[in-house]
Amino acid sequence: MYDFEVYTGKILPVPGEPDLGASSNVVLDLVKSVPTGIYNLLYFKNWFTSLPLMTTLAKKQILCLGTVRVNRLPGISFGSDKDLLKTGRGTHQEKSALIDDVEVRAVKWMDNRSVNLLSTFASVEPKSECKRYDKKKKSTVMIPCPAIVLEYNKFMGGVDLMDSLLSLYRIHTRSKKYYHKLLFHFLDVTVVNCWLLYRRDCKDLGIPSRKIMMLQVFKLSLAEALLLEGKSVLVRKRGRPSSASSIAAEFARKKRVSCY
């Protein structure tokens, strides 16, 4: 997670930016922390995608790709789902346009149902194939797949991965107060982000996968380290223990024994 905005029921326009509607205004607010001038790539789902947002971000040298709702593509028409399905799964259509000096491409691809995408950098080419299950043949088949679909699936998967990892070892609380839920949620997000960075660095250093801590072990190690923060840790020395250390250990043991 790079940045976030807590939804409070009303989304205001971003100062100094055009008012593009609630969904687009969220994106314009969040990209304020993204460095400009180096052509970053941004991916989002269909609730956020619109032509005005795409062109506005392109002028900031932020290129975009997202699924899009058909009613947000004025003047662009594709064949019906029924007609495209007749030609088989993997059929696609592509339309391009120049809007405010920004080239935008819209693609419709037929899987089990239609998928509509809009981008200022990706297109159909280079085409490839992807695996899909065929119910009639009861086996896996390869179908044509545009590059724009593979690009979207590759990077939007990060959002699903984050949600999946958060659900594994989430901190549960009985409190119904919203700020408690926010606190523990973002604590979980921070830990998952740290683990992803830790795993990336381990791979860059060539550390074998078997030696990389799993998320559960990483989270437990982090909790242990925080609990020991500021406390002295007894380091055991090799060899026969001294009489002084034996006496101290025995004294500590007796103090822990409950008296009745």
Image (tube, rainbow, N blue to C red):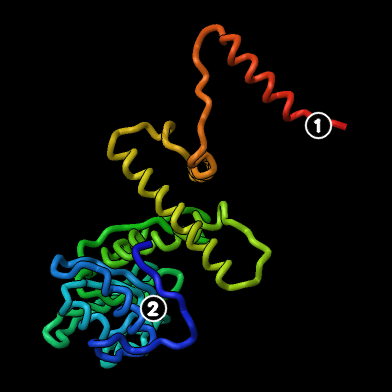
Which element is circle 1 on? loop
Query: Can you tell which quarter of the image residue 157 is in?
Result: bottom left
Which element is circle 2 on? loop
Q: Amino acid at mark 1?
A: Ser
Give the class, few, some or many, for how many residues have Cα within 10 Å of label 2's Cα (few <14, many ≥20). Answer: some
The structure residue drawn at horizontal position 25% and vertical position 72%, both measured from the top left corner, is 64
Q: Position of residue 73 (x, y in %)?
A: 30, 88
Q: Position of residue 123 (x, y in %)?
A: 22, 70
Is residue 33 or residue 147 the one in the foreground? Answer: 33
Q: Count of labels shown?
A: 2
Q: Position of residue 23 (x, y in %)?
A: 38, 83
**Residue 75 vertical placement versus 61 (above, below):** below
**Residue 83 vertical placement versus 248 (above, below):** below
Give the class, few, some or many, for how many residues have Cα within 10 Å of label 1's Cα (few <14, many ≥20). Answer: few
Read off the residue under disc 1. 258
The structure residue drawn at horizontal position 16% and vertical position 67%, both measured from the top left corner, is 39
User: Which tag, 1 or 2, sits closer to the chain's start?
Assistant: 2
User: Marks 1 and 2, how far apart in space?
Assistant: 63 Å
Point out the image quarter for the N terminus.
bottom left
Residue lying at the far left in this picture: please name it.
101
Read off the residue under disc 2. 46
